[in-house]
């Protein structure tokens, strides 16, 4: 039985044992054969290695990158050959001597033979691996690094914005836009240099240009990505190859830069996927046309602007290689650089031209730049943009803008009135259509960066270089432009009178117009003084006799006394800001006149004395006189059946009969869509509204011509008072400059029952800018309008007795304040808080989250003279204000904090983030403790910016905060919170002991301007005691390095500017101005004498106290 069970097992074991023993004996008896085989295999392997190495050398010579598997194989070969050579070299020791005879050493032979067999097996395996085809791949093309931005802060800032956009996970396409020659391509190359190898694994950049060549673009992209495309002409197949290359590795981060894009390009046709794009694939576009970037799906467009004067000269100085030593040359060089208007391309062209030039050559260059056009390279790049504009209407409006003086902000409203008179837009029948088209074309020109934003809203500007270009274009046409803004008194002499189509002249003194000038093709004439007060303009009666094609005349800001004959074809006549000693009969022959404007002018009171003049073709009548006849004579408006826009101006102190006439005549104007009026009679307004409220698309209605808010407390700090007035004026109905408005209503000191009038209710509901002062209103302010403030963007409320703006404990209308951007609450003495109860939330189905329904678009808040309010809003409401940019609080005597915390005592809280707050102003808040107080902290020792993050705040102004002892704390203020703080002003804070102490000083690392005024208790500005210093970190050893100006005044007990500065710490490296004023100068000087020698040196140098 046992034999039958173990027999097979024993037999198998015996076979294995015999085989193993046999193999071991073979190692001894086949020693010579195994060694010989090893020599042969090593030789074969070396031959293969030499062949592979030859291929590697050839690949490197052709700039190929050697495959990693080839490099690894060669290393394995070298290692194995070394081991095999050791075995072969050991064969000489395989014998031993015995009685003077050489005998085989069996043990050594056994070991060497076994090792040789193993090496042969390894060599055979390694030879089989040598099947990798080509040993290298084409290396991606590299572009050189571009330098020159090191000293240009604006360019560094722009570059950081672009990189930050590329880092954003929600952004896949970023656009870089700007004027021709402003440096968009250079910026893209700088970005490429910085992000490659860090933010992105690979970067490919290709120039698209105006004439799009798909094959060329695909080839360039393939070269830079190291991709070989076999298909030569099939664009679809080539695009598929590129798409496969860009998407094959989802973990790889790739940036594709498309430079100089002129028109919308379908990315798919290039091979760049639009759908299912990997998260790591980003596209960066550069174009002079912002609309092109938007059309290609750019989620963020960043403008590269012209260089400011200091940076422009720094770059010009570097290019032209001039030194600071030659003061005479430096003076001329600055003027030459100024003529380049901040354009890097112009700076480069001119700078390179003047390298090693002599003084007289610099003078010649300056003279040429001042009296001729810019370099052809700059002009040709602008001309490309100009020729590529969408239509002739775009070109015409751009040329029209060049009639304005350099650096002048151009009201869109002026362009509307000029364009209507010149009939620039052929297919616009109504004035409303002309205005809409003017704004559309202006926006298009801005997106092309041929127009810039002006100083005010609804204004635009032209860069000086663009003006020069436009005038050079206009001078080549059949109807040339004459533009001169430096004439003293006489009309300029010239030839070819008949060739001029537009004239714009600015006189410095009294204007003397010649008679019988023959401008047969002239359509536009603008004559104005250069300075205030108004110049007197003497116009001969026959001045216009040979200008019968005139369509637009603008004599604004002049004093006109003479009676003249105007050309009958005139369509636009602007007499704004004039002193006019003429009569209405002056306009008797103007049957085609559409625009007549007396904005801000003074008229003689016998203006309407003559018989009525019929102006039946008028579409806009602007009667906003500063001084003049009021009201209009009865029946004046009845004939104006086409009138669309009526600006009546001030209608105070008029009789009942006169009011009746106005109500009837305005009601008869069927085409009217815009109305402006200011009157002190609210009842008159309600009657006027009944006939026209619903048909008006735009309105500006006010019931007080002055209407300035009354403040019971005038700030001691004039700087803050001016800031307050500036802020409040932005919210009010603006009357001080020509501008377009939409729907603006200002009703001051009215009774609540007036709000029930249907006309008033209609205007309040439809207003987007609303200023209300209502006496005796006790309900929540939001109930002033029955359906809530749905459309309002700017809301100013004063003198209400409401305790809350919103009471959310009950039901509130949906959609209220959805569009609110600006909020002013002033003189609301019963106000306790912005809101009561929990705010409603809005479900965002697309994102699957709940978002705040109120205040999410709020940008600015002004709270003024609200005596009872202690806390503005709760933490949950504050989290809704993600777009808040400016916060100004003044004279609220009970206010303790801006944000009240929702958390319970001892609960851990996170800092509250205001991601866009740039300006924070506090004034005369004697009870104020902190931005956000902690409920478990007793006493008055909390810091001003407690538990709040303000990452973009640039401007901090505080004054009259009686309870504040500390501004900053590293424990309670996030390190990144004040990263962009540039300006700080601290006034009349009587308990404040310092500006910053210990480690909190590091929070002010980018502070540039600091003012400390009338702080009685302050003893030291910066107290370094307790500062932790890491001497191995150079950045930590430099503190307050950006501070440029320090102003100290009327701080009675101030002794130290800095105190306890640790050894090795460097402070105030860029401080260039220190102003010390009043009372404590002797104390400060005494403290200097007690300081270390090096501190005394720099302070004495800056203060000039010794």
Image: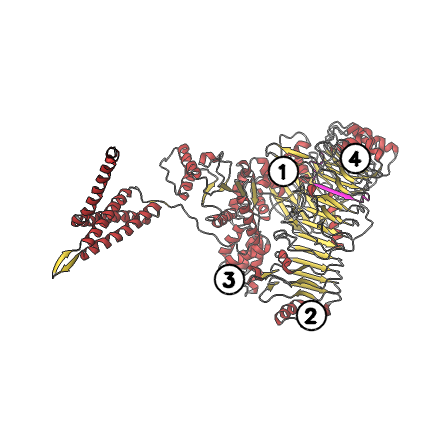
Residue reaching furthest to the right = 656
Are discs 1 and 2 less than 8 Å apart at CB? no
Residue 348 visible here: yes
| Sequence-earlier tag: 1 or 2 | 1
Q: Position of residue 948 (x, y in %)?
A: 66, 49
Q: Nearer the viewer, residue 641 or 869?
A: 869
| Sequence-earlier tag: 1 or 3 | 3
Give how far apart the Cα atoms at labels 2 and 3 are: 52 Å
Q: Which mark is residue 96?
A: none
Magenta region, main secondary structure: loop
**Quadrant of the frame with the C terminus:** bottom right
829 magenta-colored: yes
Residue that badge 2 annotates: 1087
Residue that badge 1 annotates: 521
| Sequence-earlier tag: 4 or 2 | 4
Give how far apart the Cα atoms at labels 1 and 3 are: 47 Å
Please tell me how crowded label 1 is: few (under 14), some (14-19), or many (20+) other residues with Cα within 10 Å. many
**Given this view, does label 3 or label 4 mark the residue nearer the observer?**
4
Q: Position of residue 957 (x, y in %)?
A: 71, 53
The local secondary structure at tag 1 comes to loop
563 magenta-colored: no
**Where 703 falls versus 727 (above or below)?**
above
Q: Nearer the viewer, residue 247 or 746?
A: 247
Residue that badge 4 annotates: 784
């Amino acid at each position: 039985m046992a034999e039958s069970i173990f027999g097979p097992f024993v037999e198998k074991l015996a076979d294995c044992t015999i085989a193993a023993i046999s193999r071991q004996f073979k190692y001894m008896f086949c020693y010579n054969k195994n060694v010989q085989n090893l020599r042969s295999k090593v030789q074969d392997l070396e031959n293969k290695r030499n062949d592979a190495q030859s291929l590697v050398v050839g690949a490197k010579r052709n700039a190929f990158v050697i495959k990693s598997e080839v490099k690894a194989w060669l290393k394995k070969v070298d290692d194995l050959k070394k081991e095999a050579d050791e075995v072969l070299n050991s064969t000489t020791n395989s014998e031993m001597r015995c009685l003077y005879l050489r005998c085989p050493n069996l043990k050594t032979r056994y070991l060497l033979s076994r090792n040789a067999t193993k090496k042969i097996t390894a060599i055979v395996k390694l030879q089989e691996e040598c099947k990798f085809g080509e040993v290298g791949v084409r290396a991606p093309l590299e572009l050189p690094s571009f330098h020159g931005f090191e000293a240009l802060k604006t360019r560094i800032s722009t570059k950081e914005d672009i990189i930050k956009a590329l880092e954003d996970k929600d952004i896949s396409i970023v656009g870089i836009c700007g004027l021709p020659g402003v440096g968009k391509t250079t910026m893209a190359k700088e970005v490429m240099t910085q992000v490659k190898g860090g933010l992105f694994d690979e970067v490919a950049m290709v120039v698209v240009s105006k004439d799009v060549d798909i094959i060329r673009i695909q080839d360039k992209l393939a070269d830079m990505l190291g991709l070989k495309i076999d298909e030569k002409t099939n664009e679809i197949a080539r695009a598929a190859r590129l798409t496969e290359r860009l998407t094959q590795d989802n973990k790889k981060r790739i940036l594709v830069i498309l430079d100089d894009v002129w028109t919308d390009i379908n990315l798919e046709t290039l091979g760049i996927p639009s759908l299912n794009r990997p998260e790591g694939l980003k596209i960066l576009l550069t174009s002079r046309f912002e609309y092109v970037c938007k059309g290609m799906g750019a989620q963020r467009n960043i403008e590269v602007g012209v260089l400011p004067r200091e940076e422009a000269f720094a770059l010009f100085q570097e290019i032209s290689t001039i030194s600071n030593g030659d003061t005479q040359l430096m003076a001329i060089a600055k003027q030459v650089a100024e003529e380049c208007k901040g354009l890097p391309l112009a700076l480069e062209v001119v700078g390179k031209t003047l390298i090693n030039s002599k003084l007289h050559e610099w003078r010649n260059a300056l003279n040429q730049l001042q009296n001729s056009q810019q370099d052809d390279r700059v002009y040709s790049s602008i001309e490309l943009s100009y020729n590529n504009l969408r239509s002739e209407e775009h070109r015409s409006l751009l040329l029209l803008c060049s009639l304005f003086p350099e650096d002048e902000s151009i009201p869109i409203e002026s362009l509307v009135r000029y364009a209507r008179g010149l009939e620039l837009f052929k297919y616009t029948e109504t004035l409303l259509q002309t205005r809409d088209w003017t704004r559309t074309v202006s926006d298009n020109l801005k997106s092309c960066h041929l127009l810039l934003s002006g100083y005010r809203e609804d204004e635009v500007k032209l860069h000086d270089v663009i003006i020069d270009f436009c005038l050079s274009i206009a001078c080549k046409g059949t109807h040339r432009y004459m533009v001169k803004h430096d004439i003293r008194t006489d009309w300029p002499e010239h030839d070819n009178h008949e060739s001029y189509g537009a004239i714009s002249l600015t006189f410095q003194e009294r204007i003397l117009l010649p008679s019988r000038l023959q401008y047969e093709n002239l359509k536009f004439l603008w004559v104005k003084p250069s300075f205030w007060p108004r110049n007197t303009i003497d116009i001969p009666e026959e001045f216009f006799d040979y200008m019968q094609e005139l369509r637009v005349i603008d004599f604004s800001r002049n004093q006109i006394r003479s009676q003249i004959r105007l050309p009958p074809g005139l369509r636009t006549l602007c007499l704004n800001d004039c002193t006019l000693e003429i009569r209405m009969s002056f306009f008797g022959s103007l049957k085609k006149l559409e625009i007549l404007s007396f904005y801000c002018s003074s008229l003689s009171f016998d203006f309407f004395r003559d018989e009525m003049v019929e102006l039946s073709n008028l579409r806009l009548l602007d009667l906003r006189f500063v001084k003049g006849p009021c009201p209009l004579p009865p029946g004046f408006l009845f004939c104006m059946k086409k009138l669309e826009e009526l600006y009546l101006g001030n209608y105070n102190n008029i009789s009942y009969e006169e009011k009746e006439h106005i109500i009837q005549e305005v009601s008869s104007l069927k085409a009217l869509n815009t109305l402006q009026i200011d009157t002190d009679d609210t009842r008159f307004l309600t009657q006027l509204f009944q006939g026209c409220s619903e048909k008006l698309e735009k309105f500006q209605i006010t019931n007080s011509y002055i209407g300035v808010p009354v403040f019971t407390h005038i700030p001691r700090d004039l700087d803050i008072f001016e800031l307050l007035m500036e802020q409040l004026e932005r919210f009010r109905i603006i009357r001080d400059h020509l501008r377009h408005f939409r729907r603006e209503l200002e009703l001051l000191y009215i009774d609540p029952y007036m709000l029930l009038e249907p006309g008033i209710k209609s205007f309040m509901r439809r207003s987007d800018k609303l200023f209300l002062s209502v006496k005796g209103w006790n309900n929540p302010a939001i109930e002033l309008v029955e359906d809530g403030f749905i459309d309002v963007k700017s809301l100013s409320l004063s003198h209400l007795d409401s305790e809350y703006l919103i009471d959310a404990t009950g039901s509130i209308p949906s959609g209220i304040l959805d569009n609110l951007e600006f909020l002013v609450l002033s003189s609301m003495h019963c106000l306790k808080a912005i809101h009561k109860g929990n705010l409603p939330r809005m479900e965002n189905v697309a994102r699957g989250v709940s978002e705040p329904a109120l205040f999410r678009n709020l940008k600015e808040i002004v709270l003024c003279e609200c005596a009872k309010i202690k806390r503005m809003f709760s933490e949950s409401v504050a989290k809704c204000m993600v777009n808040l940019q400016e916060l100004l609080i003044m004279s609220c005597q009970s206010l303790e904090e801006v944000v009240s915390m929702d958390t319970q005592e001892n609960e851990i809280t996170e800092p509250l983030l205001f991601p866009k707050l740039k300006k924070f102003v506090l004034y005369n808040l004697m009870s104020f403790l902190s931005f956000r107080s902690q409920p478990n902290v007793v006493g008055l020792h909390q810091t001003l910016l407690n538990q709040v993050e303000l990452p973009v705040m640039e401007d901090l102004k505080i004054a009259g905060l009686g309870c504040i002892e500390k501004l900053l704390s590293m424990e309670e203020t996030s390190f990144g919170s004040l990263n962009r703080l540039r300006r700080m002003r601290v006034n009349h804070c009587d308990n404040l002991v310092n500006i910053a102490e210990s480690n909190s000083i590091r929070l002010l690392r980018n502070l540039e301007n600091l003012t400390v005024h009338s702080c009685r208790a302050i003893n030291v500005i910066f107290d370094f005691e307790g500062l932790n210093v890491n001497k191995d970190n150079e950045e930590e050893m430099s503190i307050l390095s950006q501070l440029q100006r320090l102003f100290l005044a009327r701080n009675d007990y101030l002794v130290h500017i800095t105190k306890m500065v640790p050894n090795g710490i460097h402070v105030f490296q860029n401080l260039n101005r220190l102003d010390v004023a009043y009372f404590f100068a002797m104390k400060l000087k005494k403290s200097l004498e007690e300081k270390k020698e090096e501190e005394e040196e720099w302070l004495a140098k800056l203060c000039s106290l010794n």
